[in-house]
Image: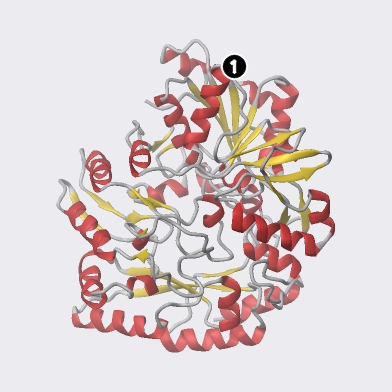
Amino acid sequence: MFLPLTLDEAKKRGWNSIDIILVTGDAYIDHPSFGTAVIGRVLEKAGYTVGIIAMPNFMDPSSIEVMGRPNLFFGITSGNIDSMLARFTAFKKIRNDDPYVPGGMGGVKPSNAIITYCNLIKQRFKDVPIVIGGIEASMRRLVHYDFIQNKLRRSILVDSRADILVYGMGESQTVEIANRLSGGQSMEGISGTVTIARNKPLNAFLLPSEKDAMESNEALVTMYKQFYQNFQSKLIVQESGGRYIVHYPPPQISQHQLDSYYEVPYTRKPHPVYTRTIPAYTMIQYSINAHRGCAGGCSFCTLTLHQGKRIVSRSRDSIKQEITAIAAKKTIHITDIGGPSANMYGMECSIGGCNRESCVFPALCKHLKINTREWIDLMDEALTLPNVKKVSVGSGIRYDLFMWSKDCLRELSYFITHFVSGQLKVAPEHIDSTVLRAMRKVPLYPLAEFVKAFNHECKRQAKEYYLVPYLMTCQPGSTDSSVYRMRSEIEAIFGYVPYQCQAFIPLPMTLSSIQYYTGSDPLTGEMFFVEKNAKARRKQHGILMRR
């Protein structure tokens, strides 16, 4: 049974009131790949009644009243991606589509969705606590650069006037908030949250103030370096208009906890109120989330600040139970068993963690245990389950880590035989050494050698499979000449230039966003050329995209 979208649906479940109302800019898809569904189901398992307001009409304040007043709080998210990214392209054009809404229609969610939804709630329910979360809140939790508006913005917690911000995936934090509010307790001190205090907490690491960071590039770079190097282990504070933004370190989840988030009763379908196809759902309907975290630490990516660099993998039993449930009534093709990079499943630190910003940059850390065989064995076991006709990898692999495995050529052969379905995605992103350094993505294995090995094995097996490389233009460090070189090398290596090319967007709070705004890498101090002129950015992207 779905979580209710209306009071009538709630009453059919025997609920006379709603403890928590979750508001999202996306359609409600009851599947573990969608954050609102996960948070809602985990809260339900904890004993709370939960309702969802999906895609409220941001032009109509009454749209936020459809489920009445919650007993505990409103939980607000823009959805699975930042609303500014959902609304605008890399060249700041309005998008006509949104894969997270019925029919893929653009314009359903507003710009700055969290702030907009919070304002609607404040108009109607002034005294109800508001909790904000999801990727938009997570990556705007302190001073950040907004590319679409081309300006620095203060913490979204301040601008939204919410009571508390949850960063990261948020399950344990949200349940703890519900427990605290139901017991009449303070929400201060919860791991993985950000709050505002009148007084500076004792023993906190003090960042440059909000005012200084927004007025001085030097202070901004210092702030970001200090934050990036300390947020996972220290209580961090930033002065903001006479008050203090208090950032608590993230929680450390266990495999058992991660497994539990997938054991709740998802229907794995969109709510039946939707009559049109939701594109994002069709893409991931039969995919399996196998782990969280990313050891890469690429400068343009949100994962390190959102999920952390520590890989937490689900147990094999948990994953097999999920697949068995999906395939209980029909034969299926599992289109992915992975995460940020599928082959990071099972990777772990042999010493339990350290202060390195990345496990793979500028060189592979000797303490990172690469367990490619464990991931392949997991997919092998999935293939033996009833009604599973095929298992393939849709999300792509980190090819250079794959080739660091002790028996990589044999594993590559086996992988191609059983788990590639026509195409395999890889993400070299660029070939220029300066750009790759800005990306913090120096390849650990030569791209050309991997492509050669892949093509040789495909030919040996008489399989017509293709590698699909993801490439990026306009990144800090990238110039017209470097893109010309990339086009030439990619064509020489792959035999073609792919359509899967994107223009860089400085996502809030990423290392690359600070590089873009200041021209400086906050961790190394290295200066990079940054192309900011809109016409010149289009020209650079066009070099790679011309046919």
**Residue at far front of view:** 203
Q: Quadrant of residue 254?
A: top left
Q: Exactly how many numbered labels are in the figure?
A: 1
Q: Is residue 147 visible?
A: no
- Residue at figure coordinates x 32%, y 57% from the top left: 346
**Amino acid, disc 1:** Gly
Q: Quadrant of the C terminus?
A: bottom right
453 relative position to 172: left or right: left
Q: Quadrant of residue 411?
A: bottom left
Q: Compared with residue 273, is residue 404 higher up or lower down, i.e. above or below?
A: below
Q: Quadrant of the N terminus?
A: top left
Q: Is residue 127 visible?
A: yes
Q: Compared with residue 435, is residue 118 higher up or lower down, i.e. above or below?
A: above
Q: Between residues 370 and 456, which one lies in front from this camera angle?
A: 370
128 relative position to 390: left or right: right
Q: Compared with residue 532, is residue 395 higher up or lower down, i.e. above or below?
A: above
Q: Between residues 445 and 460, which one lies in front from this camera angle?
A: 445
In percent of width and height, residue 409 lies at: 24, 78
241 relative position to 391: left or right: right
- The local crowd at label 1, few if under 14, some if 14 to 19, many if 20 or more residues have their Cα within 10 Å, is few
Describe the element under mark 1 as helix, strand or loop. loop
Specify the color scheme.
secondary structure
For label 1, the residue is 184
Q: Between residues 93 and 240, which one lies in front from this camera angle?
A: 240
In percent of width and height, residue 464 lies at: 27, 76
In percent of width and height, residue 285 lies at: 36, 46
